[in-house]
Image (cartoon, helix red, strand yellow):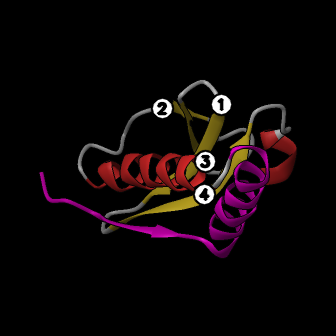
Amino acid sequence: MTPRRVVFSPHARNDLARLFDWILQKVGADVAGAYLARVESYCLDLEVGPERGTRHDDVRPGLRIVGFERSLTIAFTVADDRVTILRCLYRGRDWARDLR
């Protein structure tokens, strides 16, 4: 199986930056940095075998959703040569509405 390149959409990067800022305010830079490093590592691991998660073609064609540490929803699509991380939404967000 050939690895695919993982790219983060501008929306996903913005989601992660806002999440970092929120965690930073609550518990500090060390915890925020460690959490974001785990999220990014998880996303980058989608380069191999990205056909995981639940498909939601009813929301958006090719959309897949996976949870991360029971607190984050990661939305992505898979193409022949890449995985695109669309959004990284913290718990409680209406991801279906955000992705339509």
On screen, residue 57 versus residue 8, left or right, reads right
Judging depth in this view, the residue of 49 and 55 nearest the camera is: 49
Q: Work out whether mark 3 precedes mark 4 in sequence or the reverse, and give the earlier one.
A: 4
Q: Quadrant of residue 12?
A: bottom right
Which residue is found at the position 48% from the left and 32% from the top? 53
Amino acid type at circle 4 is Ala
Residue behind mark 2: 53
Q: Are marks 2 and 4 in contact (CB under 8 Å)?
A: no
Residue 22: x and y in percent read: 78, 53
C-alpha span from label 3 to label 4: 25 Å
Residue behind mark 1: 71
Residue depth check, mark 1 versus mark 3: number of the one nearer the observer: 1
Above or below residue 36? Residue 72 is: above
Residue 43: x and y in percent read: 42, 51
Residue depth check, mark 3 versus mark 4: number of the one nearer the observer: 4
Q: Are there few (<14), some (14-19), or many (20+) residues within 10 Å of tag 2?
A: some
Residue 48: x and y in percent read: 23, 49
On screen, residue 76 versus residue 20, left or right, reads left
